[in-house]
Amino acid sequence: MKNALVVFNYNAGRKKAILYKKIIHKFLLKRCSLFKFVSIDELDNTDLNGYDTIFAVGGDGTVNKVARIIAGTDKILAIIPSGTANLLSAKLGIPTSLKKALKIIDKNNIKKIDALNINNFPSFLRCGFGYDSDIICKTPQSIKNDFGYFAYFLAGIIFALKLNIRTYDINFDGKNIKIKASCIIVSNSANMYRNWVSVGRKNELDDGLMDVFVLSTKNPVSFFIEFLKILLNIKFNTKKTKYFKTNKLMIKNNWIACHIDGEKMKLKNDINISVIPQILNVYSK
């Protein structure tokens, strides 16, 4: 690390990121010949030339925005998790403690990770349809501000009581399947609720594969049984759940609402998802 740009989301994690600035400044004084601090709102108008390391101080939204800009370059992403979920940092083994996160960066262990290309939109976490989309897109920001990550847990219970079924046409590995599902999750990083739950099987960020999870139940009791199986890592294909890995996937679409890395989307065309192998350099445990 020679020259660093530090991108802050000052509103992340109940404005916790503001408290980090002084410590990060002291950290960089000892290690860099040049560094600069900018807000996430200034990033689009900031020249990244000359910086080898880009810090993202905030939640997954901040991390994903920075990652999309520097993916495919030699620049290294340094994550300082200070948001609500911090899913990518959790998958990389980066603690939420600022001092411990800086120690990870200081070890200079750099990992190359995959991304998903979703209709030409890069994704480093996951996209979700149905139930997963409802949780991410319909949980009010005010509740997230008051309850933090627990807000998603509460929303998960509420939306599980009113599951809706939709028919999806899916094509992968030369197979065409038509399936009725209340939830489909396509993941690069399959961890949820930090690292407590994973909807993938042996999911890795650099394996060149996406993890696909399909839930086909409308009954809340059946849903909670399937969710318990996920918690206990009992993951096998049944009439109600399907798990598979692939590097390319297409979902026939009729204006499906979804989320991509927590951002609400409504995709008009058929959804084409492919893996972009090892496109991002990032500090990892």
Image: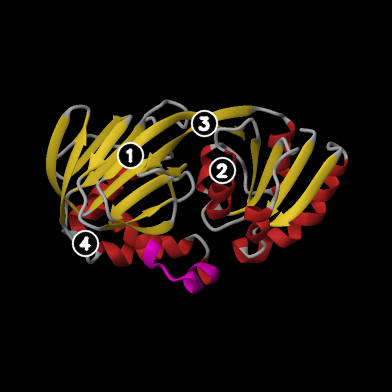
Quarter holding the N terminus is top right
Q: Which residue is mark 3?
A: 279
Q: Earlier in the sequence, mark 1 or mark 3?
A: 1
CB within 8 Å, label 2 to label 4: no
**Marker disc for residue 273:** 1
Which class describes the residues within 10 Å of circle 3: few (<14), some (14-19), or many (20+)? many
Q: Is residue 112 above or below residue 199?
A: above
Q: Earlier in the sequence, mark 3 or mark 4?
A: 4
Looking at the image, which is closer to me, 177 or 202?
A: 177
Q: Earlier in the sequence, mark 1 or mark 4?
A: 4
Q: Is residue 275 left or right of residue 219?
A: right
Q: Is residue 90 left or right of residue 219?
A: right
Reply yes or no: does residue 141 show up in magenta: yes
Q: How far apart are labels 1 and 4 at the CA level? A: 25 Å
Q: Please state the horizontal and vertical placement of residue 206, each as a whole percent of the image.
A: 47, 28
Nearer the observer: mark 3 or 4; the answer is: 3
Quarter holding the C terminus is top right
Q: How far apart are labels 3 and 4 at the CA level? A: 36 Å
Q: Which residue is mark 4?
A: 163
Q: Which residues are magenta?
A: 137-145
